[in-house]
């Protein structure tokens, strides 16, 4: 996991940028998951400053690789698309991050 922790922040902001938290919130609000384009549109509708679609895609793929999100790849006209879904709610994500940090600290002993 190549995630950085900012101890000057609280909660999820210790690990994620605002747009990344907003991306997760959008997915938590979704019943059936969303494509990256849908996440990008919904996040930008919430923001004063727009965020690039590439930033959203890179974040979603990183969360997929970390096991925080699941993805279903659909093939259709224009190629492959991934529908992203959360594997854990906000409380479970915080517990997961807490576990990872503890494991990393304990590994240094």
Image: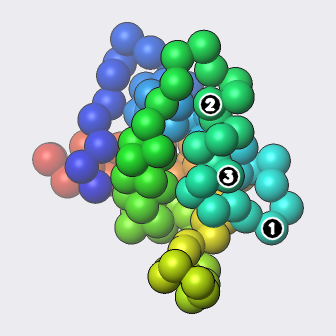
89 sits left or right of 23 in the view: right
Lower sequence index among marks 2 and 1: 1
Q: Nearer the viewer, residue 27 or 45?
A: 45
Lower sequence index among marks 3 and 2: 3
At x 80% / y 55%, what residue is drawn?
Answer: 30
Extreme residue in the left direction: 108
At x 14% / y 47%, what residue is drawn?
Answer: 108
Q: Nearer the viewer, mark 2 or mark 1?
A: 2
- Residue 9 in the image: state x and y as whole percent: 44, 15
Q: Which residue is mark 1?
A: 32
For the residues labelled 1 and 3, say whether their Cβ atoms are less than 8 Å apart.
Answer: no
Q: Secondary structure at mark 3?
A: helix
Q: Is residue 92 visible?
A: no
The answer to whether residue 4 is above or below residue 71 is above
Q: Nearer the viewer, residue 99 or 27?
A: 27
Give how far apart the Cα atoms at labels 1 and 3 are: 12 Å
Q: Which residue is mark 2?
A: 44
92 sits left or right of 67 in the view: right
What is the quadrant of the N terminus in the image? Answer: bottom left
Specify the quadrant of the image occupied by residue 83. Answer: bottom right
The answer to whether residue 18 is above or below residue 100 is above
At x 85% / y 61%, what residue is drawn?
Answer: 31
Q: Nearer the viewer, mark 1 or mark 3?
A: 3
Q: Is residue 11 visible?
A: yes
Q: Secondary structure at mark 2?
A: helix
54 sits left or right of 88 in the view: left
Give how far apart the Cα atoms at labels 3 and 2 are: 10 Å
Q: Which residue is mark 3?
A: 38
């Amino acid at each position: 996991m190549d995630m950085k922790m900012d101890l000057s922040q609280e909660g999820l902001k210790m690990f994620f940028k605002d747009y990344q938290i907003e991306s997760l919130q959008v997915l938590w609000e979704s019943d059936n998951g969303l494509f990256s384009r849908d996440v990008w549109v919904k996040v930008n509708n919430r923001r004063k400053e727009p965020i690039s679609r590439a930033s959203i895609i890179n974040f979603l793929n990183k969360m997929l690789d970390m096991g925080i999100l699941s993805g279903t790849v659909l093939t259709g006209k224009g190629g492959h698309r991934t529908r992203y879904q959360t594997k854990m709610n906000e409380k479970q994500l915080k517990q997961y991050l807490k576990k990872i940090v503890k494991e990393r600290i304990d590994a240094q002993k």
